[in-house]
Image: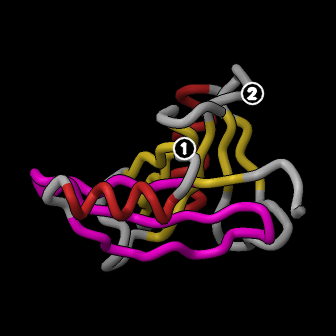
Amino acid sequence: MPHGDITHIDIPADDLDRAKAFYSGLFGWDINEVPGFEGYPMWQAPNKISGGGFGLRDGNLQVPRSYVEVDSIDDALARVTELGGKTVQGKQEISPTSWWAVFEDSEGNQLGLYEGTTDAG
């Protein structure tokens, strides 16, 4: 996905099974556990492009959070600070070729960042 595209949406849930039944029934989303991410069911829309996951509602995830693809999380977080926002969760590895972070914008909204490459080299 190009820089700036929405790539993932986290949806908080108090009951993961109930949330999975609701969203698969409402939108026809394919919802599965992914090896390495047990307890975090991933959903994919019928277009096979849009997707996200269900996380248990906790202190870090209270409302849905969209993730935006960026070329560089480090550069994006520096720009967030320059523009009056702040880093909430610094860069974290998902896999050897992908990372995520969370920032708060100038209005108090939290969004996620996603950076990924197609190869490890």
Left or right: 34, with 56 as reference point? right
Q: CA distance from mark 1 to mark 2?
A: 17 Å
Position above or below: 51 against 89: above
Q: Position of residue 78 (x, y in %)?
A: 34, 63
Q: Are marks 1 and 2 in contact (CB under 8 Å)?
A: no
Magenta residues, as a range?
86-114
The residue singled out by tag 2 in the image is 48
Q: Residue at x 74, y 73 (%)?
A: 38
Between 58 and 94, the one nearer to me in the picture: 94
Q: Would you say the magenta stretch is mainly helix, strand or loop?
A: strand
Between 34 and 25, the one nearer to me in the picture: 34
How many neighbours does mark 2 have within 10 angstroms: few (below 14), some (14-19), or many (20 or more)? few
Q: Nearer the viewer, mark 1 or mark 2?
A: 1
Q: Position of residue 97 (x, y in %)?
A: 78, 62
Name the residue type under label 2.
Lys
Furthest residue to the top? 47
Q: Position of residue 84 (x, y in %)?
A: 13, 59
Q: Magenta stretch containing residue 56, yes or no?
A: no
Left or right: 10, with 116 as reference point? left
Helix, strand or loop at label 2? It is loop
The residue singled out by tag 1 in the image is 69
Helix, strand or loop at label 1? It is strand
Q: Quadrant of residue 108?
A: bottom left
